Amino acid sequence: MREITSKVIETRTGHYARQFFVNGEKIFIKGGGYGPDLLQRRSAEKYSIEFNYMKDVGMNAVRLEGKMENE
């Protein structure tokens, strides 16, 4: 990855959206937010399983909320 750019475009419905490009290629960002359960102890293995679920459904962006217990 060398360059990430974006531009604001007007959609067919008259709304505005941001379009992203990586190395000049248009990409579609599909993502969500992740917040760990603060009342449970988690292992690195459990985090790995949950993040693999995200990859399996095609997410390419994740916003982390809170502090992860494991680096």
Image (cartoon, rainbow, N blue to C red):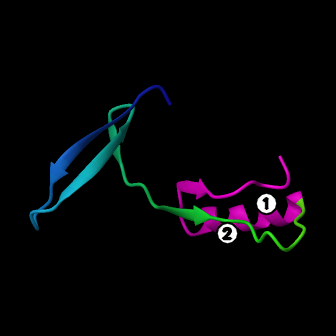
Direction from residue 35 to residue 15 in the image, left or right: left
Is residue 65 inside the magenta stretch?
Answer: yes
The residue that mark 1 highlights is 48
Q: Which residue appears at 42% of the width and 55% of the height?
A: 29
Q: Is residue 24 left or right of residue 14?
A: right
- In this figure, which residue is indicated by the disc labeled 2? 53
> Which numbered disc, 1 or 2, marks the residue that appears first in the sequence?
1
Q: Amino acid at mark 2?
A: Tyr
Q: Amino acid at mark 1?
A: Ser
At a point 87% along the width and 57% down the height, the residue shown is: 44
41 up-or-down from 20: above or below: below
Residue 15 as seen in the image, left or right of residue 68:
left
How packed mark 2 is, by other alpha carbons closer than 10 Å (few <14, some 14-19, many 20 or more), is few
Q: Residue at x 70, y 62 (%)?
A: 51
Asked which secondary structure carries label 2, the reply is helix
Instruction: Give the magenta-colored segment's residue range.
Output: 44-71
> Where residue 58 sits: x, y (%)?
53, 64
Residue placed most toward the observer, 62 or 28: 62
Checking the image for residue 11, the label placed there is none
- Give the image location of residue 54, x and y in percent: 62, 65
